[in-house]
Image (tube, rainbow, N blue to C red):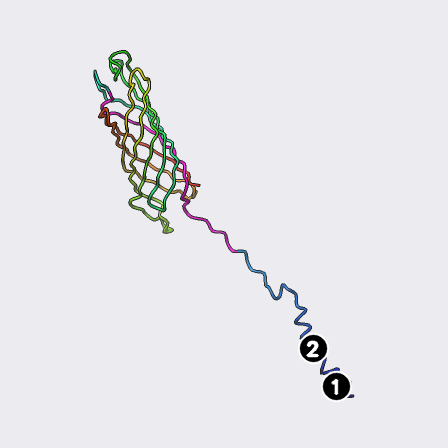
Amino acid sequence: MKALASLALFSVLVVPTLARAQQSPAANNPVKDRPAETFNEIERGLYFLVQGGPSFLVNAPADTGPRPFSSGQAAHVEVGIDIGERLSLGVFVLGTANRAGSDYVGNSGGAASGDFSSIVPGVTMRAHLVGFADNQEVKRTFIYARAGAGFAMFSPKLLLPDSDILVFAGPGVEYYTRLRHFSVGLEVTGSYLISSGTVGFALMPNLKYAF
């Protein structure tokens, strides 16, 4: 009887303990949902930008003869980096092609006349001044100001042999689309060629991709 009593007591004390020890790891470590992956509503950082549109020179560069109003086209390619939400710095190459009549002789002294083009490498800075939030409280629309400078080289060389320094500035509006890497914008730019005193302006739609 004493042995039976001892066996019963052993069963009461030990068996539940063994049962708890043999519970599956899944019971001790319940499966949790994988954390949801989140994305930035707007990507900022290294970017690539293209823009182009009509451009105009109020007084085409020339040392003799007429300095006519000249219309043309401009194309601009830029690589840069966003520094936070408000500031961007970049390097660019700008190409222009302008119309001019046969009476325009530029700096050639009459040896050449007519249309001309330019290539301008340079640096630029953009500052977002005011941002507007959408209905999800995400600032997608910004009014900005951009300024920059570049080294203008003209073609044909016989018509405009001397290079010049181009400075420019102007306002624009940029909208960050729901395709979070892309933004689109429209910019009005005023320009000035320092040596020749040439004044110009351009209307430039643009497309930007941020990595």
Query: Which of the numbered marks, if any, corresponds to residue 5?
Result: 1
Q: Type of residue at label 2? A: Val
Q: Earlier in the sequence, mark 1 or mark 2?
A: 1
Give left or right: position of 26 versus 35.
right
In which quadrant of the rendered view does residue 50 lie?
A: top left
Give left or right: position of 19 versus 36.
right
Q: Type of residue at label 1? A: Ala
Query: Which of the numbered marks, if any, corresponds to residue 14?
Result: 2
Q: From mark 1 to mark 2, how far is it between C-alphas?
A: 14 Å
Give left or right: position of 83 versus 66.
right
Query: Which of the numbered marks, if any, corresponds to residue 186?
Result: none
- The image shows residue 196 at horizontal and vertical percentages of 23, 24
Tell me if residue 53 is in the magenta stretch: yes
Tell me if residue 70 is in the magenta stretch: no
Relative to 64, is 127 above or below? below
- The image shows residue 12 at horizontal and vertical percentages of 70, 80
Residue range of the region highlighted in magenta in the rendering: 35-61
Helix, strand or loop for disc 1 = helix
Q: Nearer the viewer, residue 147 or 180?
A: 147
Q: Nearer the viewer, residue 131 or 107?
A: 107
Residue at screen point 30% across, 18% down: 115
- The image shows residue 127 at horizontal and vertical percentages of 31, 42
Helix, strand or loop for disc 2 = helix
Circle 2 residues within 10 Å: few <14, some 14–19, many ≥20:
few
Residue at screen point 32% across, 32% down: 204
- The image shows residue 101 at horizontal and vertical percentages of 27, 16
Q: Quadrant of the N terminus?
A: bottom right
View extreme (top): residue: 111
